[in-house]
Image (cartoon, rainbow, N blue to C red):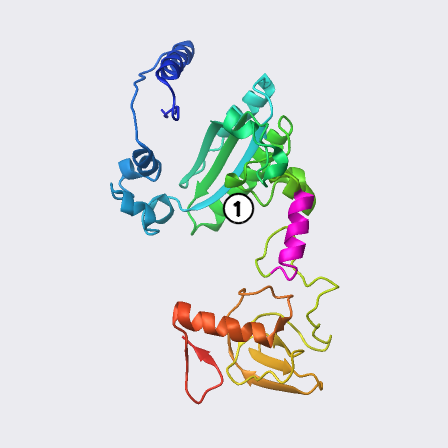
Amino acid sequence: NFPSLCFDCSPEQVEWFEAKVNEIAEEVGGGSCHSFAHGWFDQLLFEAGRDRGVIENKAEALMDRNQGYGANGPVRASKNGGYLADSYDVSDAMLDTLTNWTFGEKRENYPWSLLVLIYNMAGPKITDVPASSAAYGGRDAKFVVHFKHQWNEESLTSHNDLMQHHHDMSVALERHMPCKNFYNYMDGDMPCANGDRDRWLNAFFSDVGRMQHIKATEDPQNVFQSHLLPNRVPPDSQWPHVPSSASTTALAFTTTMASTSGSDVVSTSAPEISTTVIAANDTTTTSTTTVLPDVVSSTNQVPVSFLSDLEACLREAIGLVVVQGESSWDE
């Protein structure tokens, strides 16, 4: 029991669409079909769970991250996946595979769900735009098979089971579909990419080489981290490297460090939670800090000047207050 949607269809298209849905329903054993019309906000609220009581019936609720399936759904952990089809002529084997993995024998005794949606992707608004004009990939795709596993985030058993089911379903579909996906359903573990970064990028985007060139030119330090560059400082970096004797396992901030040279860099040695300022004359000073992990890549060497700018930004954005007379940051 599910809706088949026709977006922005003309009256003639709606008439054809309803006839085709009724024809399919009769062929598979009949059913109770009816038509309904939604405006854009109605449809967004419907898909966000309005009819299931997980979000208020007003447009403003769409801006509240504490509403909707993500916050109030029965199962809140999820894993996305999907594959683009380059032809409407799909094989019976592909349809059988999708059916078996969707309605198969998996019947566990804990809450879980598997959502499968098929969206048309083709049309002149998409295909008339040259592939080289933007990063959007798959302009020639006819439709996308999107699937999403969901489970109770507190259960390690269901997590392991559903992640394995997702992987095995992906492998099965890849026997019949190309290694291409729509990036709204981005899956960082596509088996067909086999851990290869470039192959994974080409599964989602067009002209990856151009994207990598722009990334390397405009953001060589990978400050805005992405898969387009390895998560490291390039060998030809203008930033100096931390000597091998210093470790860089986390990022920390201290109010006592002073830049005596443009070559000053900061490294952190966790779990001691200390900050070492390495000056141009190779002298070092260390002070205790509060660590803020994962703000910047653990393998990037960060100039003191950058941390000064970041400190000012953090003060304004999230209200961190420096305790007077102390060398550490407290929330």
State the SS at label 1.
Answer: helix
* Magenta residue check for 179: no
* Residue at left offset 33%, top offset 49%: 63
Q: Position of residue 153 (x, y in %)?
A: 43, 50
- In this view, the residue farthest toward the bottom is 325
Q: Quadrant of residue 140?
A: top right
Q: Position of residue 124 (x, y in %)?
A: 52, 25
* Residue at left offset 31%, top offset 37%: 41
* Residue at left offset 58%, top offset 17%: 89
Predominant SS along the magenta part: helix
Q: Position of residue 266 (x, y in %)?
A: 62, 76
Q: Is residue 295 left or right of residue 299?
A: left
Q: How many marks?
A: 1
State the quadrant of the N terminus.
top left
Depth check, front residue: 245 or 31:
245
Depth check, front residue: 317 or 158:
317
Give the extent of the magenta segment.
Answer: 208-222
Image vertical order of residue 247 relative to residue 130, above or below: below
Q: Is residue 296 left or right of residue 152?
A: right
Q: Is residue 119 left or right of residue 217?
A: left
Which residue is labeled 1 in the image? 160
Q: Quadrant of residue 330?
A: bottom left
Q: Position of residue 8 (x, y in %)?
A: 38, 25
